[in-house]
Each structure stands twice: as structure tokens, then as C-alpha cells.
Amino acid sequence: MPDRTTVTLPSATGYWVESRWPLVSLVFVCPLLLAYEIGVLALGPEAVRNGADVWLRQLLDAIGFGQYFLLPVLTVCLLLAWHYTTGLPWRVPRGVLSGMLGECLVLALCLRVILEVQGRLLAGITGRAGLLTLDLSGLCGRAVGFLGAGVYEELLFRLMLFSGAVWLLRRLGLKRPMATAGSVVLTSLSFAGAHYIGPHGEPVAWSQGLFWFSFSFRFLAGVFFSLLFVYRGFGIAAGAHAGYDILVGIVQF
């Protein structure tokens, strides 16, 4: 889990501080997590899981832990353990969750603007760039997949890989700013590249402009979510991620 060398959580109060608390993040993402897991069960064979979810479950299976609900339980336990190590109060301040919802919507719009600006700068290369969402059948399937992307991609790439990269680079002697910057770049490249791996990944076409357009946007999105994780916490990063996917994939904005 992230340590104090990865994300510093101030002891002050107020929305901008309290919304970063791991406990608050947990309460905020729990509806997304429940909706995703229940949705996948309800859709049955018609459901295609989010890629990050599949990889995490395969990892658990490989080490002998294949129970279905183990991954969401571990997600909850990880955030609870992180909150315990901070010494912060065990409460969710009034009004903070609604504020986080509004903030995530604004941030999702900001990422959509980044996509639009990139498209205009690279005139002639068109198309919407999704994140690590798979080709789900039907509106409900897409919505469920987008919720899973928000939680499990941020769990994998930010809470686990980014935090682990910062810890490793710090142990190798890098100062915190350099370790953080290096981890942002490394995990953002991994995040972008993950969209082209596996049977549901997009084809790699080195000679096509659309490939580089989508890869570069996903790299920028990885940087965007990494900065949100560092400065605004896990809950905001996950909510903004899910919000962007829904905005582009469902609302078609």
C-alpha cells in the first residue's frame, strides 16, 4: 500500500484534505465496486470483464487464491489498511462525498477537453480514445465495464504499480520529486501499452497515425490520473476515470 514516501496526507481538515483520506475514497468508490461486481454477475456470460480486473484475478489464481469475491474484498482491506497507517480519523465528513462526485464530473470533462485539443492539434487523425475498456455488448454491459475500469485500473496502475514504483525509486536513492516524476512516466507508459495486450487489446499498427494518436492520449490520461492520485487521492482518480469512460462511451460526448 502507499506509504508516507508516496502520498503525503495532511492532518488538516477541509474538503480538499478530507477527500484524499483513504477511508473517504473507499466509501466513495464502494458503489462503483458493488455496481460492477453485481452487474457482471447479473449479465453472466454476456459480460466481458475489465482488463485490469482479469489480470488481477489471474494473478490471484496463480498464487492459489481463486475465490470470486476475494479481489473486491482485498481492495476494501487495502484501503482500510492504508487509512489505518495514516492515523487519520475513522469518519466520513458530511458533504465530502457529494463534493467528490461533482469534482469527478468536472475532471472527466477536463480529460475530454484534453482529447479534443489533441485531436485539433493533430488535425486529420480522428477518433475517440477509450481507456482500458473492452468491447462490451449492450448499454448495460458498457456501463458496467466503465465502472470496473474506474476502480480496478486505478487500483492496478496507481494504487499498486505507481506506489510500488515510487517506493522502489526512493530505495534506489532518488529524491521524492524525481521518484514521483519517474513513476508517473513509467506507469503512464504501462497504462497506455496495456490497451494493446491480450485478445481484447487493440491492434498495434506502427505505421498508422491513429495508433499513435490513441497511444499518446492514453499516456496523457495516465499522467492525468497519476497526478490526481498524488494530489487528490484514490477516490477522485477512480471517479474521474469512470466518469470519463461513461462520458465518452455512453453519453457519446
Image: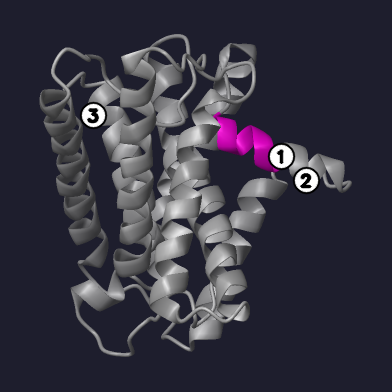
Mark 2–mark 3 Cα distance, whole angstroms, equals 32 Å
Classified by dominant secondary structure, the portion drawn in magenta counts as: helix
| Element under disc 2 | helix
Among the 4 quarters of the image, the one containing residue 10? bottom left
The residue that mark 1 highlights is 57
Vertical arrangement, residue 139 with respect to residue 156, above or below: above
Q: Along the polypeptide, which appears first: circle 2 or circle 3?
A: 2
Disc number at residue 247? 3
Occupied quadrant, residue 3: bottom right
Disc 3 vs disc 1: Cβ atoms closer than 8 Å? no
- Tags 1 and 2 touching, CB below 8 Å: yes
The kind of residue on which mark 1 rests is: Arg
Could you tell me which residue is drawn at 50 percent across and 28 percent down?
A: 195
Task: Tell me where the magenta segment starts and ends, as one range.
Answer: 50-56
Q: Which mark is residue 60?
A: 2
Residue 32 drawn at (x, y percent): 42, 43
**How packed is label 1: few (under 14 Cα within 10 Å), some, or many (20 or more)?**
some
Q: Nearer the viewer, residue 89 or 230?
A: 230
Gap in angstroms between the C-alphas marked 1 and 2: 5 Å
- Three-letter amino acid code of the residue under disc 3: Leu
214 over 46 or under it: above or below: below
Q: Position of residue 176 (x, y in %)?
A: 44, 79
Q: Amino acid at mark 2?
A: Leu
**Rounded to the nearest whole Å, what is the CA distance between mark 3 and mark 1?**
27 Å
Q: Residue furthest right?
A: 64
- In this rendering, does residue 67 appear at all? no
Residue drawn at x 41%, y 10% is 138
Residue 53 included in the magenta stretch of the image: yes
The image shows residue 43 at horizontal and vertical percentages of: 55, 18
For the rendered model, the colour scheme is one colour
Judging depth in this view, the residue of 187 and 174 nearest the camera is 174
Q: Is residue 102 above or below residue 183?
A: above
